[in-house]
Image (cartoon, rainbow, N blue to C red):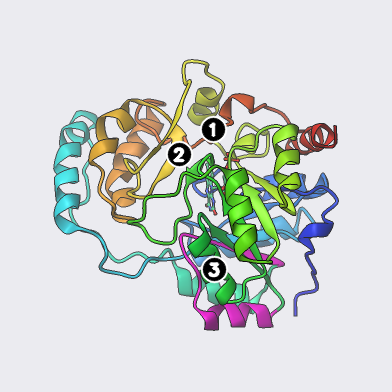
Amino acid sequence: MSSYDVDFAALTVPIIAAPMAGGASTPELVAAVNAAGGLGFLAAGYRTAVAMSEQIAATRGLTGRPFGVNLFVPSPPGQSAGEALLAYRAELLPEAERWGVELPARFAADDDGWAGKLAALLADPVAVVSYTFGLPSRQEADALRAVGTAQVATVTGVEEARAAARIGVDVLCVQGPEAGGHRGTHRVEDEPGEVPLLELLALVRAATDLPLIAAGGLGTGAAVAAALRAGAVAAQLGTAYLRSDEAGTSATHRAALADPRFTETVVTRAFTGRPARGLRNAFIDRHGPHAPHAYPEVHHLTQPLRAAAAHRADPQALHLWAGTAHPTTRPGPAADITAQLWREARG
Ligand SMILES: Cc1cc2nc3c(=O)[nH]c(=O)nc-3n(C[C@H](O)[C@H](O)[C@H](O)COP(=O)(O)O)c2cc1C
């Protein structure tokens, strides 16, 4: 059994640093938010099981308090539309030629190393595991429960909340449309709901008694307080930590978040094939309307373009994930950001 017991309703500071795959979440960020009384999360998405375990070990070296690990749940295979994907590839080819990169023409099956990560988390349990993009099977959830791990399911609507309750997760992370990064919709092809977070919390509350974590667009203490008043036991913030000292956010992404010329965020499938909210830029405007519902294929297809954009520090061609509260982000130590948000939230 895990020696940890996470009571989300009893966190010293009910603020959770969202898992942020792609480099932003680091062991240092987790430890800093833990030290401030909140709860940090590692993001296992896009990493191998071995890399995940290395991050868990590094985090244990920095904090003695419980922390979470987030997993991408793979979609059932065979859902992605081949023709639409080839058409999108053809659309991106001139850009690839311009920047001297090759786009993949074939896409190997990719389940984000799901089985290996679950095996590692069963062999060496952590306090909390959260899921996005779907749910584990009941057997998988049972197995993690048996080793003492608390389980959180990301849900973006009432039906997903009911499905998560049915497999026996402990907590729901209710993600509103304001959220930065990917929407956690359980099916790739679903268009994500647009009911604002505070209303969505009320709808989910009516459907289940499970404790709720609120996520999406919470950038100020007042917004955190409103989410807690709406019945959430904790607030999960991603964008608010992107400019923190401990985050692994790229310099280009940090600069864009602080650049008043980026005035707007939009939800797009342009970069990965799944809906995700980011700062509006030229790539999204050009390609967003044509991107197919194909994840993770579109993620792999655009990867060389994004790597080239990162190399030349071009914010117009990079995925700059950010939530609607992006104008409120601040730089500095994550512990200070957490403490200030909580001070403001308490009024
Ligand atoms: C850069 C970035 C990466 C993210 N990666 C993940 C992830 O790997 N897993 C996950 O469950 N959520 C991920 N999210 C979504 C967060 O869990 C959370 O729902 C979101 O950050 C809340 O909205 P906010 O950014 O407005 O605070 C990510 C968000 C951002 C901004």
Specify whether tag 2 is near ligand 1 (CB below 8 Å). yes
Identify the disc placed on residue 31.
none
Of 211 and 276, nearer the camera is: 211
Q: Position of residue 252 (x, y in %)?
A: 48, 27
Is residue 219 shown above or below 234? Answer: above
Camera-nearest label, 2 or 3: 3
Q: CA distance from mark 2 to mark 1?
A: 8 Å
| Element type where label 2 sits in the image | strand
In reply to whether residue 143 is colored magenta, the answer given is yes
In reply to whether residue 188 is colored magenta, the answer given is no
Tag 2: Cα neighbours inside 10 Å, few (<14), some, or many (≥20)?
A: many
Is residue 261 shown above or below 61? Answer: above
Can you identify the residue that label 3 sits on? 162
Q: Position of residue 223 (x, y in %)?
A: 69, 36
The single residue placed furthest to the top in the displayed view is: 261
The amino acid beneath tag 2 is Arg
Residue range in magenta is 127-147
The amino acid beneath tag 1 is Thr
Residue 12 horizontal side relative to residue 333, left or right = right
Can you identify the residue that label 2 sits on? 277
**Residue 26, visible in the rendered structure:** no
Tag 1: Cα neighbours inside 10 Å, few (<14), some, or many (≥20)?
A: many
Image-quadrant location for residue 127: bottom right
